[in-house]
Amino acid sequence: MHVVPRHRTAMSRSAISRPIATALADQLVAESMTVFDYGCGRGGDVRSLSALGFHADGWDPAHRPNVERRPADVVNLGYVVNVIEDPIERANTLRSAWDLARRLLVVSARLVWESRDLVGIPMGDGLVTRTGTFQKFFQQSELADWIRQVLEVEPVAAAPGIFYVFRDAADEQQFLAQRVYSYRPRMRVDPHQMYEKYSNMLTPLMTFLSGHGRPPRQGELSPDDERLVIEALGTIGRATQLIRQVTDADYWEQVRRQRRAELLIYVALSRFGRRPRFTQLGPTLARDIKAHFSTYREACLQADRLLYGAGDQTMIYLSARGSSVGKQTPTSLYVHRSALAQLPPLLQVYEGCARVLCGTIEQANLIKLSVTDSQVSYLTYPRFDRDAHPTLETAVTVNLKKLTVGWRDYSRSENPPLLHRKEEFIGPDDTRRTLYERLTRAEVRAGLYEQPSSIGTLAGWQRTLANAGVTVQGHRLKRI
């Protein structure tokens, strides 16, 4: 029997691993929580978290075998299951880690696209690499199905190759609700002597009203914030009335519509897996739904209609063509991540369906919504803000019919795709829009867009600039 030296897969880390960094970014790990790294290798995450003030420990059969495996609020099973060649032991390892997780289990494994340049000998459901280690590469949906089958709990995709498994349904629903993209219009406040006097202490109340589209109930503001407002103005109701007196009524109507849309999108996407009961939502989320829909049943009915529409390519096409944000092409709608919440709710559900499968692509800043195929792509342009014409680095494509997640790397390409007319990707009230529009007008006047098919890649764009005798410096066009 071939003995696999699993300890050789342990990496020496100088930075926090991607699964832990993802959980931190999603605000699922707080300093008050305990963290246990199950299969911690050389202990890089344990050291990094401890240095940041977290209560962290870890066990590893090769490098830290004498550490007690004890329960923790958050347990990380980071790139462990993919190095276990025995499927029964692999499943038992997942169960053991889950048994220790009081609130959250983070499970990660390597995906099929990471095996492209790897040479090895097939063994079982994986392969043995040149160094003698075993690797099992998963499809994103395969990893989700496996976790679901072993634990009999619905996992939540956090990112490609990373899943969350929540112990408490309310924690899971709070996370899913927060993942819906939100947008609020700019607020204009009229001068008002009383408001100006109490503006600092009214800020937390203003934030709550803008976020939820309703006044807070007792206990929904922090005790100190609530006490200061009541001492100054008597009641939360009077403070709310004052805020509405000095702000536009149109603003609050837009907030109401936006929050209602956000809740619809969340409830629609909660259909994946098992939709929670009303009692599992958590008090604040439940109150939001009652305030905007009267009943949870009504919210579910409307959300299901939205979800049904997201599976109808004709409705997707019509919704995309009617969108006031995003760049239209014959086959797709492109939108910057900052403007996703300004898309029609149907398109947000469409994008959300892709995120249910692949999780959040943290570095992706452009989303491509296909209107001809059930497909969503997450595009990474690292220099979108800096460069007038940024180039594409990576693309993650989610096929909603085949339930596959694909990846393409353009970082080593000598002729990658690049962007024009950046203002078309962002929202109408984005502060960058004026700068981008001014450059586009100058480029149109210079005749640079007369041959669209020749300027879509870096080499073609550079030839067009040279032929026209111009160059782009910053976001300005200059003659050579």
Image (tube, rainbow, N blue to C red):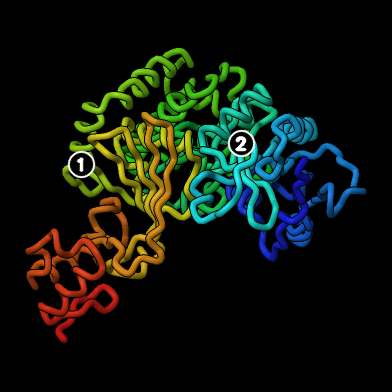
Q: Callout 2, which amino acid?
A: Asp
Residue at the extreme bottom of the image, as rendered: 480
Q: Which residue is rendered at x = 10% and y = 78% of the image?
A: 468
Residue 11, by quadrant, is bottom right
Quadrant of the image occupied by residue 268: top left
Where is residue 455 drawn, in percent x and y?
Answer: 17, 64
Label 1's element? loop
Image location (x, y in percent) of residue 45? 73, 56
How far separated are the C-alphas under marks 2 and 1?
Answer: 38 Å
Q: Residue 307 occupies which quadrant of the picture?
A: top left
- Please state, as top left, top right, bottom left or bottom right, where the N terminus lies in the image: top right
Q: Secondary structure at mark 2?
A: loop
Q: Is residue 293 above or below residue 66?
A: above
**Which residue carries the number 2 mark?**
125
The kind of residue on which mark 1 rests is Thr
The number of numbered badges drawn on the structure is: 2
Look at the image and tell me whether residue 246 can be seen.
no
Residue depicted at x 12% and y 60%: 452
Q: Is residue 219 above or below residue 460?
A: above
Q: What residue is shown at x 39% (from left), y 48% (from top)? A: 378
| Figure check: 291 above or below 125 | above
Front-most of residues 264 and 157: 157
Q: Which residue is mark 1?
A: 331
